[in-house]
Amino acid sequence: MSDYLIVAGLAAVMAMTLVLPFSVKRVEEELEAFLFVMGMAAVSISGLWSLHLVHEALKEPLPITAAVAVVGFLFRGVRSRLKGWLDALIRRAGLPGAVFTVVALLGLGSSVLTAIVSAIILAEVVTLLKFDRAFEIRLTVYACYAIGLGAALTPLGEPLSTIVVAKLKGPPHHADFFYLLRQIGTWVIPGVLLCASLAARGAKAAVTQAAGLEEDAPDSNTDIFKRAGKVYLFVMALVFLGAGLTPLAERFMLKMPTWALYWANSISAVLDNATLAAAEITPAMTDRQITFILMGLLVSGGMLIPGNIPNIISSAKLGIKSREWARVALLPGALLMLAYFVLMTLLVK
């Protein structure tokens, strides 16, 4: 197959990957299977099938899949004690201090707990803390920003970080378990703490006994195993997709200015950021390019519900509508994008 046909075929795959989940409800509902098909199509068009690639696709999802299942069962086991722990924390730190502590711990802890389980815990916490609906939505949004940022610090946290480490583990980056912590930790950790501070602001004034947001239902064994299975298929699909789209990314992404890569990734507000990371990042990129791409994906991913796993889980469990989410999340997300861009342009070499 000629280079032009390969590029055209991969461009078509990438276009369908970006557009169909957002525009076709059936594709959105069966995203993992759709991405799996797109990944196999991309590898076939690129002619990059190998036993090594198949082995990587089978192996890479295992750690995060195991983490999702194990932590899911552990949380279900201690779920009944959560109210007692929250009450003790509120007595010790006060209500704003407790909200700050919970959001910060969920954000930073999501790199081990996984973004999925952190979002499930968040829904339970919001149900237990009796605030008015407007504050509960704001708390959920800022907490999801914190979780979305913090989960990227290790390959256990979310599919995006799993895929990035898998794609960069060879030369020249030699990414290991702590690669992302070293690469973007300086930017992510202050962002998590800032989001926790914003989430806690005004907590005392928002207390109410009226019914607010409420988690839909506890997880059954079937729910936990089904969620873990979806994560496995999702990451496997992204391994294939990332490998298959590498020729396209190397041909076009490497030529884009770093600032353009950053702002182009604001599309992550409406598209899953792990999918975009799989399509964009290649080992030929510099550390500076990787930092800008990742921070653009992570920050903009919090702006709308489809952009990030914790947004999707929390909004579904708590019944938050897309318009309610956007009304709270868009402005702080845009300000964060601008602040990070200015600071990284000045400080990242």
Image (cartoon, grey):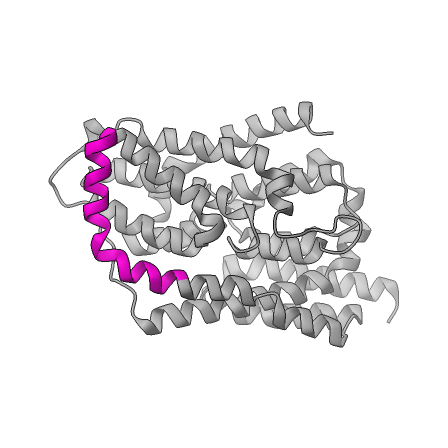
Residue 75 pos. (x, y %): 32, 58
Of residues 240 and 72, the one drawn nearer to the viewer in this rendering: 72
Quarter assignment of residue 343: top right
Query: Image point 76% across, 70% down: which residue?
Result: 45
Dividing the image into 4 quarters, which one contains the C terminus? top right
- 184 lies left or right of 150: right
Q: Position of residue 69 (x, y in %)?
A: 42, 66
Left or right for 180, reference 243:
left
- Where is residue 303? Give x, y as percent: 46, 41
Query: As displayed, is residue 25 above or below residue 118?
Result: below
Q: Quadrant of residue 264?
A: top right
Instruction: Count numbered badges in the picture.
Output: 0
Q: Residue at x 78, y 62 (%)?
A: 8
Q: Quadrant of residue 57?
A: bottom right
Residue at the spot x=24%, y=62% of the render?
A: 217
Q: What's drawn in magenta, residue-wise?
A: 71-95
- Magenta stretch containing residue 77, yes or no? yes
Residue that sits furthest to the right in the current view: 2
Which quadrant, please, contains the N terminus? bottom right
> Looking at this view, is 33 or 100 the one in front?
100
Q: Chief secondary structure of the magenta span?
A: helix
Q: Is residue 40 magenta?
A: no
Q: Residue at x 48, y 45 (%)?
A: 148
In the figure, is residue 348 to the left or right of 211?
right
